[in-house]
Amino acid sequence: MKTLWRDGEHVREVETTPLGAGRWRVRVDLAEFELAVEGMPDGKLRLAGDDGVTVAEVTPVGSQRFVRLGTLDFVLEREIGGSRSAAGGTHGHGLEAPMPGVITKVMVVVGDDVTKGQPLLALEAMKMEHVIRAPHAGRVKSVSASPGQMVQSGATLVELEGA
């Protein structure tokens, strides 16, 4: 999934690709790397890559993300239209986790046609199950979550195409 984020005066293109087993390929502008990502009990993320291990803390506030990587702090703002597909830059229709939690059920696969209000997946947070439903009819373009996976608030879970 590609998104655009404003970092001060710069707009960064960020692409994340799940590789399975908690591993991700991440590209920020032209820099590409692989990370093992592990959710920690306090909601922080342990990131392990070729350069070592660091702890990340992401606090979403509206379209902004306050990010702490080790001792570095960033304020990122999602650009309007900040999600685009790899082919052609059209706006995406990603459904994001409303809060940190654990995915308990995934009820769709890529290519499924869905109706408005149809359950797509379930997320357990604060000892309650939250069902994420389709905001409109469409076709499932991608599923970035799997049962048992810990996700942070704002993480894209499912992308739909068509409106």
Image (cartoon, rainbow, N blue to C red):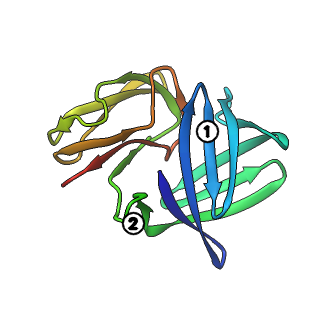
Residue at numbered disc 1 = 24
Residue that numbered label 2 is attached to: 89
- Helix, strand or loop for disc 2: loop
- 9 and 126: which one is in front? 9
Label count reads 2
Going 45% across and 21% down the picture, which residue do you hit? Answer: 147
**Looking at the picture, does residue 103 appear above or below residue 94?**
above
For residue 78, side relative to residue 107 (left or right): right
Earlier residue among tags 1 and 2: 1
Residue 74 is left or right of residue 99, and the answer is: right
Name the disc covering residue 128, or none.
none
* Amino acid type assigned to the residue bearing label 1 in the image: Trp
At horizontal 18% and vertical 55% (from top left) the residue drawn is 163
Whether residue 139 sits left or right of residue 49 in the image: it is left
Residue 52: quarter of image: top right
Write down the quadrant of residue 104 in the picture.
Answer: top left
Residue 57 place in picture, x, y as percent: 69, 45
Residue at 19 percent across and 48 percent down: it is: 136
Which residue is pictured at 82% across the width and 47% down the height?
A: 70
Residue nearest the viewer, comparing 152 with 129: 152
Classed neighbour count for the residue bearing mark 1: other residues with Cα under 10 Å, few (<14), some (14–19), many (≥20): some
Q: Amino acid at mark 2?
A: Gly
Circle 1/circle 2 CB separation < 8 Å = no
**Residue 19 at what x, y percent from top left?**
56, 34
* Residue 69 image point, x, y percent: 76, 50
Measure the C-alpha gap from mark 1 to mark 2: 22 Å
